[in-house]
Amino acid sequence: MDLPSVPPRSTRSPALKADPYAQLKLLDVQALDTRADQLRHQRARLPEIARLAELSAKHADVANLARDARIDVDDLTLEQSKVDADVEQVKTRRDRDRDRIDQGLIANPRDLERMGHELQSLERRIASLEDQELEVMERLETAQARLDELTGMLTETEAEIAELEASRDEKQREIDAKLVDVEAQRGPAVEGLPADLLALYDKLRAAKAGIGAAELRQRRCNGCQLGIDAAELASIKAKPADTVVRCEECSRILVRTSESGL
């Protein structure tokens, strides 16, 4: 026994209805949302922000170099202090022995001869230490010059950072004030819009790069900027004014106006 055929159930959702004025009002909401998105984009991409990121990385690199240079200066300063102390210690011993000889406190010829040799050895030791002292001083001078250079770079970078931060903050305050104004206008703009229309708009805006509703203008969708063929235009024209039309290409809400070219 043949069963009666059952027509396939349509999967197309029933057309959304909304007063034509509400649809036009949705374009005002879209304009405000687009302006808010533009302001947020501008705020997040101020040229000062990119430059500050560069300077922050530069500052970190120079700070690391300055830290290493400071360690070199500190190490060489300690080394110089040690060499200076060694020179003074040997000179003190030399002067003490020389004074003993000059005062005639050493009478034994052998002791005098031994002390004479010791004085010669001390002079050689002093000369060697003074050469070492000079070499350490030169290295310390070079290290200190490098540290001074890096410290100057840090100071210049910090000054530029402070200037850029002040400029960034001022521009962001200006943008924030504009955002507050735009957001204040949005409340009255959405007031009275059907909940289902607004829900569809918000859903599309989230999925379509911030554009949920677009004007049908001069036979073109202002959302995807694609022209609409004659057959589709005829279909749109035939729909009741309260039917919410969707673009066949981008699925955005397509709002008909006197400039649509229907």
Image (tube, rainbow, N blue to C red):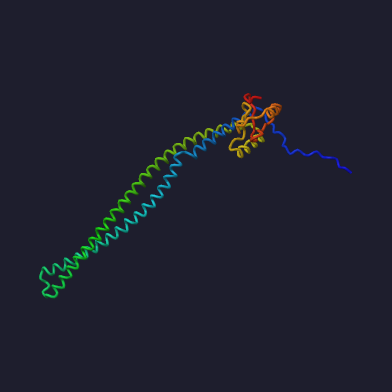
Position of the N terminus, as image quadrant, is top right
In front: 49, or 113? 113
In front: 21, or 83? 83
Q: Is residue 56 left or right of residue 28?
A: left
Question: Residue 32: x and y, percent?
Answer: 56, 32
Say which residue appears at 41% left-offset and 40% top-offset: 164
User: Can you see residue 241?
Assistant: no
Q: Is residue 231 left or right of residue 184?
A: right
Question: Residue 181: x and y, percent?
Answer: 52, 33
Residue 107 position (above or below residue 71) = below
In front: 195, or 215? 215
Residue 238 position (above or below residue 195) = above
Say which residue appears at 32% left-offset and 59% top-offset: 75
Residue 261, located in which quarter of the rendered image? Answer: top right
Q: Is residue 58 left or right of residue 35?
A: left
User: Can you see residue 38?
Assistant: yes
Question: Residue 132: x and y, percent?
Answer: 25, 61
